[in-house]
Image (cartoon, helix red, strand yellow):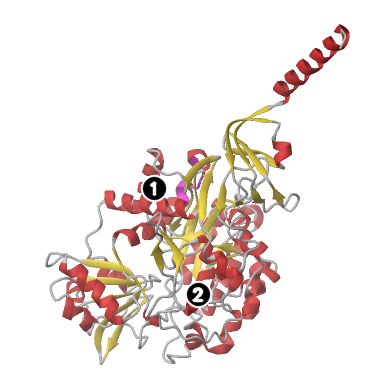
Amino acid sequence: MNSARKRRLVFFLAGLLIGRIVNAEEVDVLFTTGNIYTVNDRQPHAEAVATKNGRIVFVGSNDDAKKFHAAKIVDLRGRTVVPGFTDSHCHIFGIGEREMRLNLEGTNSREDFLARVRERVEKTGPGKWITGRGWIETFWKPPQFPARQDLDKIAPNNPVFLTRADGHASIVNSAALKIAGIDKNTPDPFGGQILKTNGEPNGMLLDNAQDLVAKNIPKPADSEREEALLRGIDRELKLGWCEIQNAGSYKEDIDIIRKAFETGKIKIRFVNAVYGPGGDAQNFLRDGSTINAFDHHFTQRTIKVLFDGALGSRGAALLKPYSDAADTSGFLREKPEQLRPMFEEALRRGIQVETHAIGDRANRLILDLYEQAFKAVTPDERKIHDPRWRIEHAQIVDPGDIPRFAKLGLIPSMQPSHAISDLFFAPARLGMDRLVGAYAWQSFIKSGCIIAGGSDAPVERGEPMIEFYAAVGRKPLPEHGLPVRVPSKDSGQDVRWARRPEAHVPPQTEGWHPEQAVSREDALKMFTIWPAYAAFEEKDKGSIEVGKLADFTVLSQDIMKIPEMEILETQNQMTVIGGEIIYSR
Ligand SMILES: [Zn+2]
């Protein structure tokens, strides 16, 4: 090689090197070799993502990603990545409390349920309250509510208050009834029922009647509430939820949430709703919303209304009586005349409204009320033109009312797991005809709606893979049993599904309407981009796109391709929020 050629080569190499340094963009984290589902139609799949200052700056191939200088490189080893999962409807304090209190989930029989209570009574001093949650009698033989006398036998000296999994009913013992001053002459409160046998209260309290007893239970200290919040959030992050939309809170809890953010204790994205009508909602309407506080981690712009009860306890307000209880068609928990002025004020102030409506009567009435408010407050009188109001659950809807959602620009916020739990007893409660508009995901999507997907935990277990499986499978969980977690040998953590030995579940699935199941693509949207839209966040969240916040969930298996049953065995492997790995296993 002559000297001129040598010089040229040196210049060429130096040029390459300098070019490389100049062109190489600095990024914070580079995630490579992933099987990335972006939920972005223009670029549905990718291998690599780069993040900087908490946002996505690159989505593309491994080759194209080589141009980056990254402070940290994460090799995804081919694992599946989806936009950070959002639970559009959960109760975060309840999730934490479920971990802290007597957890009655998975009690297969009345005996099993009573044994767990007895165990707790033995550890509790006389006179102290025993509270718990999670029982569901529909799996017992016979599937009947427990009675106060059952509890009196095992807890003669302690008031007992045990809430059904759905939160819409509780069983209490005689000591608790006595403290609350409930006897055969106590009238039903508005929006609730004191169930009676031979004219005497039998211990079952539905919906608002629960408060008659609950208000006598000593309130947990703020420190306990905070512990519940943080334990709940910790659980959510482990499961792969990057954002939770908390379906209702009172002032005390809002203060606890804010304080926890201020002291840096919360890393999950948190969208909060305030219960209304009432003083808290009035204050909220006056003070206005909080948007993207704590570096895009906390938003509060929604009022949550509880309009009826639930199907399991026959509190859902139906247009016609229950098929298995001709004397009741459920009840409303709020009076329409109290909602009207609040709804109109909310429109003027740019506050979103989300209303729990389970029965077809509750759904029709809330559609009417929303429609009246939209007419009363015209778009130019509103702070936000398109208010994106939501109906939580939209569970049993008269088929004629389904198109009204899209027409009014409303978002049904639905929980797939409710269908696969409720469909064991819904045919009895509703009869076959009314199931046509029940859990009707596909009908809503076809009518032009998006669906904000959630779990309603602690009503349900609150796991993304159960919800995803329920949405695409719309079938019972394995072996017609309920999920039972068994410890894995290596980690000691719950990981697998097993048949619950004594689960008594009727094998028939008549009336389940499999045609209402959704595609995997839509199921993925239900827990990513659609919840983002339902919270006015689609510009920042819900897909893996340049410019959006770097939130991802990394999964052990490709949930878009594996056989349905394997979805349930898929684990969250990494929870990434703002480019930071918050959890990894
Ligand atoms: Zn709920």
Which residue position holds label 2?
Answer: 478
Which residue position holds label 1?
Answer: 257
Task: Give the position of the N terminus as an image quadrant.
Answer: top right
Which badge, 2 or 1, comes first in the chain's sequence? 1
Q: CB of residue at label 1: within 8 Å of ligand 1?
A: no
Asked if 215 appears above or below 260 in the picture, the reply is: below
Range of the magenta residues?
285-293
Would residue 28 be found to the left or right of residue 61 on screen? Answer: left
Would residue 289 be found to the left or right of residue 372 on screen? Answer: left
* Quarter of image, res 385: bottom right
- Front residue of this view, candidates 128 and 192: 128
Asked if 475 appears above or below 305 in the picture, the reply is: below
Q: Residue reaching furthest front?
A: 1
* Residue beneath the point at 16% across and 70% down: 158
Secondary structure type for disc 2: helix
Would residue 141 be found to the left or right of residue 128 on screen? Answer: right
- Front residue of this view, candidates 33 and 318: 33
Indicate whether residue 484 is drawn in magenta: no
* Residue beneath the point at 66% across and 40% down: 547
**Kind of residue at badge 2:** Pro
Q: Which label sits in the foreground, 2 or 1?
A: 2
Query: How far from the left and from the top, in percent, is residue 343?
Result: 52, 61
**Kind of residue at badge 1:** Ile
Mark 2, Cα crowd under 10 Å, few <14 / some 14-19 / many 20+, is some
Please say whether residue 358 is visible from this viewpoint.
no
Mark 1, Cα crowd under 10 Å, few <14 / some 14-19 / many 20+, is many
Q: Residue reaching furthest top?
A: 3
